[in-house]
Image (spheres, grey):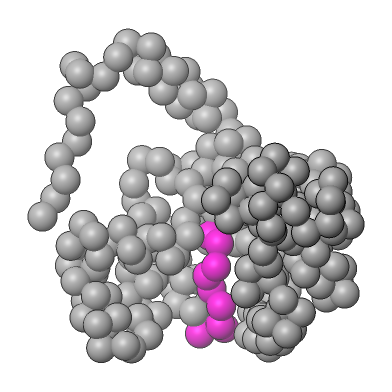
Amino acid sequence: MTTSSPNLEDVPTLNLMSEVLRRLKCDSKPDKRLILIGPPGSGKGTQSPIIKDEYCLCHLATGDMLRAAVAAKTPLGIKAKEAMDKGELVSDDLVVGIIDEAVKKPSCQKGFILDGFPRTVVQAQKLDEMLDKQGVKVDKVLNFAIDDAILEERITGRWIHPSSGRTYHTKFAPPKVSGVDDVTGEPLIQRKDDTAAVLKSRLEAFHKQTEPVIDYYSKKSIVANLHAEKPPKEVTSEVEKVLSS
């Protein structure tokens, strides 16, 4: 089942003009194919939309793309659903196939940001093979390098007010009264994933899995190690320097 494109006659003029202007501005930008690697809490989610807008790239998060392919019932999506229903992992070839489909869309014309993939050297090799067939390659791998102890402080200090989604941090943005929401006075909770024990196991898995991937791309001299412990604005300017070189 294919989804039909919207009829351009029905799109408001202002929206059409903004899109035309955006595309004209984007035409002058260099193509970029980027991979973002970093542990939970390293700031990838903050920098990714900034990079996307600045360089007119599409953001490819493999988890979202798999869900979208399953929902759209694409041939690859149907195969992915079969694997998921059996409780199996979706094969590397399927994920690379879904990325292959995505990067051919007009929104990915100037390049892409891949987030959460590749996680293994085999995946990196399959991705390279697929891009090679298109006559392109990964330009830069942004490694959000940060000390585990700093991450622990960032993440384990997070507390949330469940009904509003307001977030606090015991060190960086504490509530007026410890453990209590500023607006309602209701108790704050900590997400299960934000505890030291869970974080430790996630970081161990992350390092074990991704260090070989970083080594793989380092041999191609395309890895840029960012100082992800710095404030977001400083990391943004570091990214700009790396991508303009």
Residue drawn at 49 percent across, 24 percent down: 22
Q: Where is residue 15 in the image (x, y as percent from the top left)?
A: 37, 18
**Residue 90 horizontal side relative to residue 170, left or right:** left
**Residue 232 horizontal side relative to residue 206, left or right:** right
Residue 133 in view of the camera: no
Residue drawn at 27 percent across, 61 percent down: 69
Give the farthest residue toward the top: 13
Q: Where is residue 36 in the image (x, y as percent from the top left)?
A: 63, 61
Q: In which quarter of the image is the N terminus?
A: bottom left
Residue 92 sits inside the magenta stretch? no
Which residues are the magenta region?
A: 114-122
Q: Which image quadrant for residue 40? A: bottom right
Q: Position of residue 229 (x, y in %)?
A: 86, 60
Residue 113 in view of the camera: yes
Residue 119 sits inside the magenta stretch? yes
Residue drawn at 77 percent across, 69 percent down: 156
State how many labels appear.
0
